[in-house]
Image (cartoon, coloured by chain):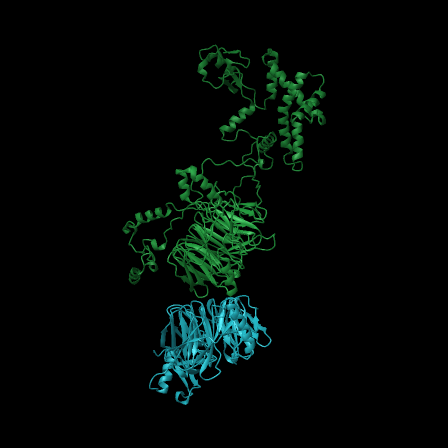
Amino acid sequence: MDAGERQVQVRFTTRLGSDLRVEATAFSLPVHLNRYGLSQIINTLLALDSPRPFDFLFDGELIRTTLEQLYLSKNLSAESILVLEYILAVGPPELQSSQPEKDWVSAVNGVNPSLILSGSYDSFARAWFPDGTCGSVLKGHSDAITSIAVAGSSNDTDLDVITSSKDKTLRLWKVPLKPSSSTLSSVRIFKGHAASVQCVAASPSNTQVCSGSWDSTIKLWKIDSEDEDNEDEQALKKRKLDGAKQSIAQVTAFTTHKEHTQCVAALEWPEDRYIFSASWDHSFRQWDVETSINTLTMTCSKALHCLSVGGEGSSLVATGGADPVLRIWDTRMPGTVVPVLQLTSHTSWISACKWHRQSPKHLLTSSYDGTVKMWDIRSKVPLQTVEAHKDKVLCADWWREDTVVTGGADCEFKLFKYTPIEWL
Amino acid sequence: MAASDDDALQVLSGDDQDDGAYSSDFEEEEADSGEEEADLDEEEGDFDDEDEEDEDSDEEDGAADGNVEANDSANHEEIREALLDYIGNGNAGADGDEESDDREAADESDSSEDEAPPRNTVGEIPLEFYKDEEHIGYDRAGRKLKKQARKDQLDSFLDRSDDPKDWHKVYDEYNDEYVELTKEEMGMISRIRQGKLPHAEVDAYQPYVDWFDWDGKGHPLSNAPEPKRRFIPSKWEAKKVVKLVRALRKGWIKLDKPKEKPRFYLMWGDDLKVNEKTANGLAYIPAPKAKLPGHEESYNPPVEYIPSEEEINSYQLMYEEDRPKFIPKKFDSLRHVPAYAEFIKEIFERCLDLYLCPRTRKKRLNIDPDSLLPKLPKPKDLQPYPTTCFLEYKGHTGAVSSISADPTGEWLLSGSRDGTVRVWEVQTGRCKKVWDMGGSVFCVAWNPNPALPVVAIAVSNDVVLLDPEVGDEEVQLNIAKLLAVQPSTSEPTENTPLIGWKRHDKLRGIQLSHQQNVVRVSWHNKGDYFVSVSPDDILFTFIYLFSFFSVELNASKRNNRAVLVHQLSKQQSQNPFRKHHGRVADVLFHPARPFMFVATKMHVRVYNLAKQELSKKLITGLQEISSMALHSGGDNLILGSKGAKLCWFDMDLSVKPYKTIKNHKEDINAVAFHKSYPLFASCSDDLSTHVFHGMVYSDLMQNPLIVPLKILHGHQKGVSDIKFHPTQPWLFTAGADSVIKLFCN
């Protein structure tokens, strides 16, 4: 650090606990410092035993340049005091476990904190326990599993799981929460789609399920067996047709949305009132459940493969599709044609995107380029990038708060843990 | 002039009627010459008369031709008399003595105030020539002048003494006579003797009259009085003017004569004129002149030009080409300047510079190249179109020969030379199904009817229909029924069926055995009919040579059966054509109307299937058609050829290509149209795929718009087939490197 270098006045603030707080005086720091340098300074100021990485926010944006470039890009006066808020930075994720599967892992679900569900191209879904053991194997589909949804549980012992498959059906399973290895068969079968079912989502109240398919329809199904008689009647009919092979109850859809013109690739049911759907016809739509009306349509220029609703007040929709750009749309501005954010870092199609269930700022994407990235929407650069799989990453989801589950075309099912836990 | 001459003649002859025609003629001639003089005189007289300029001179010239006599007859008379006089003299030159005497008298009278001419006419010759003669010479008439008898001295003395005036006499030896001096002459002699002027009346010392007025004029160059000629018009000038005027009249002088080219000219004279046009119309560029020496090249340059030691050292650090060529130096005298060491080298280099350097400017058309290009929209504005490869479908072990997409866009079918046919999931690149066909697969085709997912595969001599198992239960049932071989219920009469519909040996499907390699299968849009192409092989033509009798029958049959139309629902095959003109390359159904396009080597024939007739023959001008694709509207057709050319036919427009594009470097293997987007593409053995925007307007007056968009690279070997995704602006390319790539927008 030569003496001739320019210095700027920086004051640090934080919302962290008092043990990580520095005094609110202005320091004069050399302009060449970047995040790492600032983090070192905070560490020296706090005199921590083990150094902890910090991230710095200016004006709601993460600093990813040197202070000099920040001054230049923000057009700040060199004499003004820079107020930086520091937060705990997310460290690189650690690979917790890697489980080989028999075939490509096409779907994962980490909604329930006590178990993880994965679906594979070998037509089986599996329940995994936190210790890495495979619990139940869900056998019943005749083709690849495409998506898994968790519809809560009616009791404490088992969990209602719905899987969608390329065999054009959905199935409901009762997966036991206790670690036990068993082979399960489905409780109910949802039939009606004319082509591969691509996605499934359960309502937050866990009473209904919606599914999107290659026949470009969205069908809504009821999970609970209130109308057992009716269902039985239909099931009987089906059974007659099928030659009474199956003893499981069949469910038919009570509503079908046909507005999409191509494959419905992703669905999300953030609140009981409405559903979001993304389709290959370049649009994503919002549906009112009660009136079955398409309340919002936004059109992108590329085919959409995945969708996630989150952010502040669940108003941001992240979509990924047949290009490497993650687009984030604001549904509060229905007139807009352009996404509010376009995050570019992947090099191939985005296969999955998921908002963090608690944080309104963090987002997870997986791509066919084999990487899984975590994004903070306050920065245009991903926070962390993991070379998760050797081949395409086909699915990814959060599990608990700090763990990411991914499945890929290299037949691996992996868990990555982000440390420390306080980064939220 | 001639007319006016005649006029003059008339006037003259009219004036003196007593003269004969001859004399008048003569007169005219004379008048002409005489008049000229008169004219000159007149000119002379009128010279300073500036008022009568040209007209006057014209008139006078007219007078010179004899027009003026009428108004001045007196003058005329005088001239005539003078002329007659002259003629008379000329005629009477050799007449008698009296006349000569008369003339003598006239001559004498004519002579000036000088004394009478000497009697003798011998001239100034030494008189001793006549010393011994009796005569002293001749008089004017040529008669001898007799010498007078010399008086002896006594007589002469006596005479002298007798005659008191004798001393007044002087002997004239020339005339041989004594001349008596007059009193005036005596006086003259005495004045000469006294050293005076001979004439008493001449005053040698007249008072001086200064003709120059000195008022404010300085000193004159000469004090000589102004000569007379200064005050009178010049006679010679006037003569000259008349001559010139005459020459102009006669046309001897031409004022607007073209400039004569100088015979000799300076060969290098125009070296410095840059833009002078030569005879070829080429601008000539002169060789650049060598730089002239300046102050620094002087032997004794000013001090400021001489570099210091440091400067000279600093030159060593510079690059050689940046170093100054010449370093000024000081010498005591010019004698000490050495010869320029670099002279030869520099001259040589200059010669090298000039050698073969283009000395003429190239003739260049000043056309903006952009204006020659058609006004095409930018590719950016024509998005979406496939640009980047994101997905690869890997699994084949041999060259992928053909691909076909399922009408919903979920699946992709591919056939390969390794003998397998695979079904791929488009979104993930997963291989769903592998069928081992047991032979090289030439062509695969997915049924375009979404309700009937059946695939047709051309494997060596067979067309195989298989179920890809992607439909729902009802559809699967339907297909199972269709693909179950119906036992031929009604036994065919004399004509056995063309093709046997058999159950496939290993796979669940139908096998249609042809007699030759099937190279193409294509479905009708409704999905019930499909057509197979099995053209003649080179192998068979080879057999003809050996046993042409028996095989020729077969050959004709085979040629007949190049195109067969099959109906899936009835499991029947028919041969719609009796004969083909050449090797059939490709066959397509019109998407909506009952037309069939048959591409042979150089032509495309459009048959109306309902009327069973040839409706159109497209003349392609291509070497050999390799592939064909139809626009979804059915009125536009593209053809790819072995000559790397791509043809676009607008069938409403003409039977000749609307556009021919030579874009590839090698043979085009396949062409494809997008179903809904205005896109088409061609792929070739040169490893590239070209994507075009091909907009077909519903307005019949508007021609299709073709814009090249993108060249897609990526395959390691030739691209054998391309297909567009049915719904997305994506393109599947199948390469001989056994990889299928998906290019997305």
Residue A347 in the image: above or below residue B329: below
**Residue at image location 53% in from the left, 27% down from the top:** B188
Q: Residue furthest bottom?
A: A18
Residue B614 x, y percent position in the rendering: 56, 45
Residue at the spot x=46%, y=65% of the render? B427
Find residue A90 and report its image quarter: bottom left
Residue B260 x %, y %: 51, 35
Q: How many marks?
A: 0
Residue B205 in which image quadrant: top right
Residue A78 at what x, y percent from top left? 44, 79
The front one of B668 and A144 is A144
In front of the other: B631 or B157: B631
Foreground of the two, A420 or A283: A283
Residue placed at 42% from the left, 65% from the top? B430
Chain that appears cyan: A
Of A139 and B393, nearer the camera is A139
Q: Is residue B552 above or below residue A219?
A: above
Q: Can you see residue B706?
A: yes
Q: Colour of chain B?
A: green
